[in-house]
Amino acid sequence: MANYRMTIQYDGTRYSGWQSQHATDATIQGKLETVLTRMTGQQVDVIGSGRTDAGVHAIGQVANFHLKQPRNTGELLDGLNRYLPEDIAVSSLTEVDERFHSRYQAVCKTYRYRIHTGEVPDVFARRYVYDYRIPLDVERMREAAGLLLGEHDFKSFCGNTRMKKSTVRTLYEIRVEEHESEIDLFFTGNGFLQNMVRILTGTLIEVGDGRREPGSMTDVLARRDRQAAGYTAPALGLALLSVEYEGDGQNTMEQA
Amino acid sequence: MANYRMTIQYDGTRYSGWQSQHATDATIQGKLETVLTRMTGQQVDVIGSGRTDAGVHAIGQVANFHLKQPRNTGELLDGLNRYLPEDIAVSSLTEVDERFHSRYQAVCKTYRYRIHTGEVPDVFARRYVYDYRIPLDVERMREAAGLLLGEHDFKSFCGNTRMKKSTVRTLYEIRVEEHESEIDLFFTGNGFLQNMVRILTGTLIEVGDGRREPGSMTDVLARRDRQAAGYTAPALGLALLSVEYEGDGQNTMEQA
């Protein structure tokens, strides 16, 4: 058994997400499995680091898959990029330890949410940016973001209100970057609940435009109630930027 | 009569170009005229700085139009961006001297052509970048570009082989920028013939990948024959960046 790890970028616009309950839906995982199965002649299961919602993009999604016989990684990479639809691409592919599991071993993920605040829309980024067009006070957003950092029960920020498992997660960083006509939010944490980044974003937007006070975040967390948090920002502004694994940094240093 | 100048950006993917001989085609000019006519209740004719081909994009196309009665420019701008399709946007709109004509008074235009040379496609730029995937020697391209600068008869680089008018134009600059997995070509000149930037690009690509010698450009120009130049690079990589007018710089300085 050979185990392969790949980094994947996709424009999620026309997909039902990374994975779907409905087998007939167009999913990223499904497209990858179809191409790999056709290329190798064996049923290939692709394991993603986690699901992304319908319409959410990725620049650095990570997944792994097993093959009975080892194959040349360059040929696998070229074949994937030749046969995948033009809105999915594999940016790297390497053979890894048989025990590597992209979901169980992920230690940290970073998402980016892009908000367009300028009056003139950006036609080239329109599929990747939430067109909000209302000025947001980034200092208020940063103050609110600070109260959300650390280990908390994020039940108020969970889109699945019947979630049975633990809703405790750790947010390491929320960075608020302001550009000319765009505000980008970067969220880094050890894991994210369903819709969590989009609900965090919607809540921070409500702080930024004055509908909520930055200081109210402590109460929103304490309530453990989806109704306490803000709205779910639309999927199109969100992208999974990167997934990190234990030892990744060390490997990089060994190579250097 | 009031005269308005606007700067327009568009994703040309689904259009037959700025303007078309066939009245039924979807064109950028047609969309602007439809919205302005509906907003003002009068038949509005939009005059562009020049045509762009089907599939070509613009970041800074310039056009002007006349209205019988002056209107508030902020309201015109907001209305346009509200009613235009999401792949066309007006980034600025100002009232100008009645004599301003966006085509006759343009003194200089800059186009950009984006070539993706990396092995991994960029899924987010795929509608705006020519996916060439073969390494190009930018030094050879720069050497060839240098021979094309200045005033020349560019008949070899004109897509309309039955062009009756003068094919003499002046190229002020061709800049070749190399990024990680992309080469961008910037062309600045006093005017461009039909398909000229795309034929210049195709020819420079043939120099970059070794099919032509940089020194052959002098001969290609002298031949005055479309067959002497290279192929027409696809429309999707091309964007009209900016159009300059006499006095534009002075106005900017006066404002500063």
Image (cartoon, coloured by chain):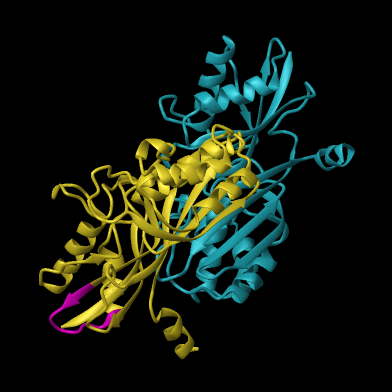
Chain colours: A yellow, B cyan
Residue in view at x 63 percent, y 49 percent: A179
Percent of width and height locating residue B20: 48, 32
Query: In the figure, is residue A30 to the left or right of A58?
Result: left
Residue B190, percent across and down?
72, 47
Disc count in the image? 0
Residue at 26 percent of width and 84 percent of height? A97
> Closest to the observer: B136 or A211?
A211
Q: Residue at x 58, y 62 (%)?
A: B184
Instruction: Measuring from the top left, give residue B212's x and y in whole percent.
Output: 53, 73
Asked if residue A68 lies in the magenta stretch, the reply is: yes
Please identify the quadrant where the N terminus of chain B is shown: top right
* Front one among B114 and B72: B72
Determine if the magenta segment contains residue B169.
no
Residue drawn 10% across the image and 68% down it: A43
The quarter holding residue A239 reads bottom left
Q: Is residue B192 above or below residue B172?
A: above
**Above or below — where is B97 with respect to A63?**
above
**Residue A3 seen by the camera:** yes
Residue B54 seen in the current view: no
Pick the front one: B219 or B136: B136
Name the quarter where the C terminus of chain B is drawn: top right
Q: Please state the extent of the stretch shown in magenta in the rendering.
A: A65-73
In the image, B125: left or right of A90? right
User: As drawn, which residue projects farthest toward the left?
Assistant: A42
Task: Please provide percent x and percent y for residue B107.
Answer: 75, 42
